[in-house]
Image (tube, grey):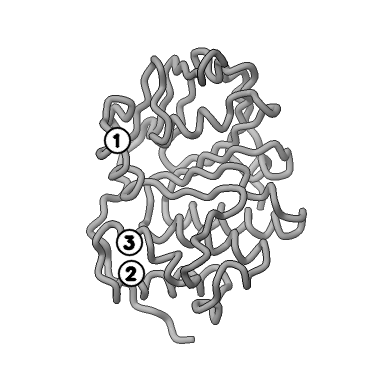
């Protein structure tokens, strides 16, 4: 397949400059009477790949969802690129998620009624990018992730690894500032999971995106620049780890 020319998007991308891109400051979040975060703090530098680890129920996924503006904390602050995320209303948080963030979840969460290409193009269409350009970018990312020829398939016709790579293409298609991945290899065998992580890390670095990754698997965390441990709703450890290559 010949290379696809991809016109530049008008969506906001990561500006130049050092410093922390994403921060949680003393974040508290409870669900009813059950506390999930008890004053969590985390700072992630621009372009950094951070693995968030911890036992089940530790609060690691809740922390990711607060950073991504999916959950609003009960108290504390969440910042992204100098913007106070927790003070935004739902409409503005939704716009931020659509334009600046990409998401990869454990089971992909593809829309089963849509084709593979339409699933990948969906974030662009929601951002009012023209259908032709959105589809071109979807085809480009599918090919880049080794899924050329699968554009017309539905999610039920894909293997688990293929579906996760489609979800990764969907996360990358808007050229996000930050990619949030919650147990992205949790439903995959070890070999397929390693392939997906290779592509996720390589693509994030190539696009200049920051990656915040929640995982319980030390092999997955080894792909990160840094590992943090969450326990009982607090970020306890900021360990420097090697980058897999």
Judging depth in this view, the residue of 242 and 14 nearest the camera is 14
Q: Position of residue 158 (x, y in %)?
A: 63, 70
Q: Position of residue 218 (x, y in %)?
A: 73, 38
Point out the tag, 2 or 1, that comes first from the N-terminus. Answer: 1
Q: Position of residue 156 (x, y in %)?
A: 61, 68
Q: Residue furthest right?
A: 190
Q: CA distance from mark 1 to mark 3?
A: 19 Å
**Pointer 2 residue:** 134
Q: Is residue 113 left or right of residue 239?
A: left
Q: Residue at x 30, y 58 (%)?
A: 126
CB-based contact (under 8 Å), mark 1 and mark 3: no
**Pointer 1 residue:** 90
Judging depth in this view, the residue of 198 and 69 nearest the camera is 69
- Asked which quadrant contains residue 76, the reply is top left
Q: CA distance from mark 2 to mark 3?
A: 6 Å
**Which mark lies nearer to you, 2 or 1?**
1
Point out the tag, 2 or 3, that comes first from the N-terminus. Answer: 3
Q: Is residue 130 left or right of residue 100?
A: left
**Which mark lies nearer to you, 1 or 3?**
1
Q: Residue at x 45, y 26 (%)?
A: 43
Q: Is residue 165 left or right of residue 131?
A: right
Q: Residue at x 45, y 55 (%)?
A: 171
CB-based contact (under 8 Å), mark 2 and mark 3: yes
Point out the tag, 1 or 3, that comes first from the N-terminus. Answer: 1
Q: Which mark is residue 139?
A: none
Q: Residue furthest bottom?
A: 1
Q: Residue at x 55, y 15 (%)?
A: 35
For the residue carrying disc 3, how many other residues have a C-alpha within 10 Å: few (<14), some (14-19), or many (20+)? many
Relative vertical location of residue 189 with respect to residue 121 in this rendering, above or below = above
Q: Position of residue 8 (x, y in %)?
A: 27, 65
Judging depth in this view, the residue of 103 and 12 nearest the camera is 103
**Pointer 3 residue:** 124
């Amino acid at each position: 397949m010949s290379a696809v020319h991809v016109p530049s998007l008008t969506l906001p991308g990561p500006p130049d400059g050092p410093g922390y891109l994403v921060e949680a400051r003393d974040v508290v979040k409870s669900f009813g009477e059950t506390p999930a975060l008890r004053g969590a703090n985390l700072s992630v530098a621009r372009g950094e790949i951070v693995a968030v680890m911890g036992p089940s129920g530790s609060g690691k996924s809740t922390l990711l969802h607060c950073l991504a503006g999916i959950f609003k904390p009960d108290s504390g602050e969440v910042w992204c690129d100098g913007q106070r995320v927790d003070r935004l209303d739902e409409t503005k948080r939704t716009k931020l998620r659509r334009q600046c963030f990409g998401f990869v979840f454990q089971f992909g969460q593809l829309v089963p009624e849509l084709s593979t290409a339409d699933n990948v193009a969906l974030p662009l269409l929601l951002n009012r990018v023209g259908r032709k350009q959105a589809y071109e970018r979807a085809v480009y990312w599918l090919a880049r992730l080794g899924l050329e020829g699968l554009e017309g398939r539905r999610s039920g016709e894909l293997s688990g690894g293929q579906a996760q790579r489609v979800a990764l293409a969907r996360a990358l298609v808007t050229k996000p500032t930050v990619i949030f991945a919650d147990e992205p290899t949790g439903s995959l065998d070890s070999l397929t999971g390693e392939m997906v992580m290779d592509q996720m890390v390589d693509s994030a670095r190539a696009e200049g995106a920051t990656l915040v990754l929640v995982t319980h698997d030390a092999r997955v965390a080894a792909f990160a620049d840094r590992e943090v441990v969450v326990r009982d709703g607090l970020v306890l450890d900021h360990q420097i780890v090697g980058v897999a290559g």
